[in-house]
Amino acid sequence: MGIPQKYETTRVNYNLPSKLVEKLKAYSEELGMPVTQTIVLLLTQSLESKTMLHELPKVTKMYDDLKESQYIKDDSLIWAKL
């Protein structure tokens, strides 16, 4: 009996360049993880990075808006004290 899975899984088969597979195996050994877990980790990180890059302009605008509103508040407080 195998280890219970936390998530539903799907078996996939891909043809990958041999050099990439060699790098993958070396990285997997470096991390001390099975190759399958390393693939899941790398794919997850890549997709999350893509999502972050897609959302970055929104986050930057929100930060700029907050910074601007703080500047206006701080500036008005300075003028009110004078």
Image (cartoon, rainbow, N blue to C red):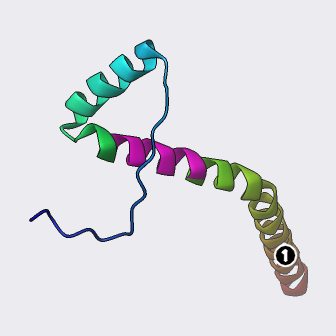
Q: Which residue does the numbered mark 1 point to in the structure image?
A: 69
Which quadrant of the structure image shows residue 13? top left
Frontmost residue, 55 versus 8: 8
Residue, x 81% and y 55% (percent of image)? 57
Query: Is residue 77 within the magenta segment?
Result: no
Q: Is residue 67 left or right of residue 50?
A: right
Task: Give the percent coordinates (x, y) of residue 37.
Answer: 31, 47
Task: Give the percent coordinates (x, y) of residue 58.
Answer: 80, 63
Q: Which residues are magenta?
A: 38-47
Vertical placement of residue 23 versus 33, above or below: above
Q: Amino acid at mark 1?
A: Ser
Q: Residue furthest top?
A: 19
Task: Give the percent coordinates (x, y) of residue 21.
Answer: 38, 22
Q: Is residue 35 left or right of residue 44?
A: left
Crowdedness of circle 1 by 10 Å Cα count: few (<14), some, many (20+)? few
Vertical placement of residue 28 versus 71, above or below: above
Frontmost residue, 62 versus 78: 62
Query: Is residue 40 within the magenta segment?
Result: yes
